[in-house]
């Protein structure tokens, strides 16, 4: 939920740390801070609010020449988002500083014990307990820093990724993880730790993925990973990641969100690459070669990833003939789901670190059911803990509102539906070839369509900008897209929106309809169209204006008609989805909202 970056090397640390924090700000943005060691003293500067507040503070001082430092950008869990609670936190001596991402569940009792020993706390955070305990153990038990970190971590319960620096070891930074992401970036004459790859991508693409309960020490010319429990060295090798720096920057766009929406043609292309055998008209998913066609599927995810799963239910059932259950992860984890060893649980997560989704994954594994993880972030917890992984290959998604990730998840889910249809012999080869041909044609068609989609989205956003509430209606596989359209509008424009199955409206929500409540209708030409038309007439009969987002040439009698390119059956979702994203985006821009960092949100939800 928070972002961490640590650096030690031959260059001034503070600007590198600030640049890293800019790449991590999507993880939390209510306060931030840096700590660094200069002339054997530990300096810490923190600020409430966005990172620019910290930059303004730093700009008031002479440039800092420290070559070891670390930074943190926070999404508050314990204690108000103010300067006092901002990280880094320091121990009583002011010689140690620590940044942390995660939640220390037993911090109250640890804090109580330390208070009894005379430790005075400065903040309301759970994090401060960590640095005070490390310092206390060093003093009381005469331990070295790594021994004290190790002993501390054995006493804490909960999730953490943390980094520690000490004024007594100016060229050294220690870091550890358990259930929260932390990576090591290996450079030349410099090394990094960070919550996510983009933080150090401008300097290195050599990454070491740390495992839970590992501790790492970085120095300018060396790094070493240890067991957090025994301090025994652990052998690790860096892996090369081929993300480019551009992919983590706005590249001339006003916001990451619009950049990521416009990247979707390329995302579809990358996601299909190597997974379609054109000559044989078949789907090739090497990762699944050892897996028999499952008896049933259970999809578990949150937010936008949940919507991708719900959308896929329609095609998975139709093409592969498998029974599919889709659950919101926070519900799945607390009921007693019936999942059997011959089933497959599919967890979908862009970040691969969503707490509820991970809990769902672990429950499935405890029950002896294989788990297929669909995720975007390399080496994330979902990727490590799943039995099988399919990466969406969408590149870093920085905007808090998820866009291209959903598109890439949908591509993979289409491939899965076709793959199991092909493997079970249910899907005729003509249909399979047709679907694959359509999929392969999508990137070019979408590329061409996006400018016009954006223009209409802008026009409609202005037209309806006074509305305080919207309905999004769809039937069949358009229903999950309606949910997603409503979610996008809510999260970045703060306009209330409800996504509904069109046929369900008359069971209550229709009472809300009046001239001030526009309805976004998602219209595909299929057997359900006459029924959807009736639902829209019911809305219009009560004075509600309808915006018809349609891939059909037929007149649906909407007050505003927004025609999008037609694709084969459900695949018109690959035009509908960007249209909905663009409408939400243009609305938020028109209303002057903070598009990439909407209030109260953070990109990865690593807490319950
Ligand atoms: O990283 P994940 O896909 O697991 O994230 C799930 C949700 O938190 C995420 O999709 C969230 O709903 C987005 N802000 C939606 O735009």
Image (cartoon, grey):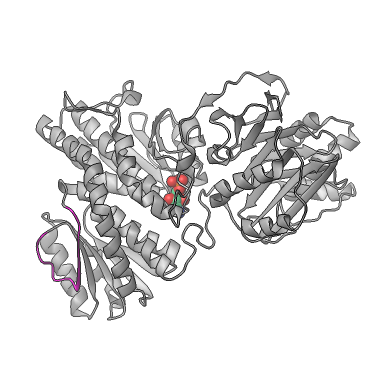
Asked if the stretch drawn in magenta spans residue 559, the answer is yes
Residue 298 appears in the figure: yes
Looking at the image, which is closer to me, 34 or 108? 34
Number of numbered discs visible in the structure rendering: 0
Residue at x-position 55% and y-position 50%: 27
Using the image, determine if residue 599 lies above or below residue 391.
Answer: below
Asked if the stretch drawn in magenta spans residue 344, the answer is no
Secondary structure, magenta segment, majority class: loop
Image location of residue 599, percent across then percent down: 53, 63
Which image quadrant is residue 217 in? top right
Looking at the image, which is closer to me, 188 or 358? 188
Residue 351 appears in the figure: no
Residue at x-position 57% and y-position 51%: 25
Magenta region, residue range? 553-565
Looking at the image, which is closer to me, 446 or 410? 446
Image location of residue 267, percent across then percent down: 34, 41
Image location of residue 20, percent across then percent down: 60, 44
Relative horizontal placement of residue 477, taking residue 331 as reference (left or right): left
Using the image, determine if residue 474 lies above or below residue 543.
Answer: above
Residue at x-position 22% and y-position 71%: 546
Image location of residue 413, percent across then percent down: 30, 39
């Amino acid at each position: 939920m928070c972002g961490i970056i640590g650096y030690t090397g031959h260059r001034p640390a503070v600007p590198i740390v600030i640049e890293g924090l800019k790449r991590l700000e999507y993880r939390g943005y209510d306060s931030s801070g840096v700590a660094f060691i200069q002339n054997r003293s530990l300096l810490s500067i923190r600020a409430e609010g966005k990172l620019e507040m910290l930059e303004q503070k730093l700009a008031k001082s002479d440039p800092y020449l420290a070559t070891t430092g670390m930074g943190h950008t926070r999404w508050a869990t314990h204690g108000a988002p103010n300067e006092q609670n901002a990280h880094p936190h320091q121990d009583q001596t002011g010689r140690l500083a620590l940044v942390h991402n995660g939640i220390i569940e037993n911090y109250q009792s640890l804090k109580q014990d330390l208070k009894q020993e005379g430790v005075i706390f400065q903040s309301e955070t759970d994090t401060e307990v960590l640095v005070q305990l490390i310092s206390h153990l060093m003093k009381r038990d005469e331990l070295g820093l790594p021994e004290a970190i190790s002993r501390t971590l054995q006493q804490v319960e909960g999730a953490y990724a943390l980094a520690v620096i000490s004024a007594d070891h100016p060229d050294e930074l220690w870091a550890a993880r358990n259930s929260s992401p932390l990576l090591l970036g290996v450079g030349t004459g410099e090394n990094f730790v960070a919550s996510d790859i983009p933080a150090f991508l401008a300097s290195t693409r050599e990454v070491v993925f740390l495992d839970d309960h590992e501790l790492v020490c970085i120095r300018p010319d060396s790094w070493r990973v240890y067991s957090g429990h025994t301090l025994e060295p652990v052998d690790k090798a860096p892996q090369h990641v081929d993300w480019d720096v551009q992919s983590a920057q706005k590249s001339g766009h006003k916001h990451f969100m619009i950049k990521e929406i416009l990247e979707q043609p390329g995302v579809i292309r990358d996601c299909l690459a190597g997974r379609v055998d054109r000559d044989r008209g078949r789907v090739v998913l090497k990762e699944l070669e050892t897996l028999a066609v499952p008896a049933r599927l259970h999809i578990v995810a949150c937010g936008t990833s949940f919507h991708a799963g719900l959308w896929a239910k329609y095609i998975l059932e139709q093409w592969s003939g498998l029974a599919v259950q889709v659950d919101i992860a926070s519900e799945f984890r607390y009921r007693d789901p019936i999942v059997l060893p011959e089933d497959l649980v599919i967890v979908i997560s862009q970040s691969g670190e969503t707490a509820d989704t991970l809990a769902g994954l672990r429950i499935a594994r405890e029950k002896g059911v294989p788990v297929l993880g669909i995720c975007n972030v390399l080496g994330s917890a979902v990727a490590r803990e799943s039995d099988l992984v399919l990466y969406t290959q969408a590149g870093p998604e920085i905007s808090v509102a998820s866009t291209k990730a959903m598109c890439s998840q949908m591509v993979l889910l289409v491939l899965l539906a076709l793959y199991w249809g092909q493997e079970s012999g249910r899907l005729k080869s003509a249909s399979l070839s047709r679907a694959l041909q359509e999929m392969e044609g999508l990137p070019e068609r979408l590329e061409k369509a996006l400018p016009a989609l954006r223009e209409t989205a802008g026009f409609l956003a202005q037209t309806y900008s006074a509305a305080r509430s919207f309905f999004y209606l769809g039937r069949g596989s358009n229903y999950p897209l309606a949910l997603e359209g409503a979610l996008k509008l809510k999260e970045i424009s703060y306009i209330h929106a409800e996504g509904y199955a069109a046929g369900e409206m008359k069971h209550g929500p229709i009472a809300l309809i009046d001239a001030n409540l526009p309805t976004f209708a998602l219209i595909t030409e299929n057997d359900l169209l006459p029924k959807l038309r009736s639902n829209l007439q019911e809305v219009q009969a009560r004075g509600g204006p309808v915006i018809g987002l349609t891939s059909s040439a037929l007149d649906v009698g909407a007050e505003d008609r927004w025609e999008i390119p037609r694709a084969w059956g459900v695949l018109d979702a690959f035009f509908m989805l960007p249209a909905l994203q663009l409408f939400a985006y243009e609305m938020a821009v028109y209303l002057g909202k903070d598009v990439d960092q909407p209030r109260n949100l953070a990109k990865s939800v690593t807490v319950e």
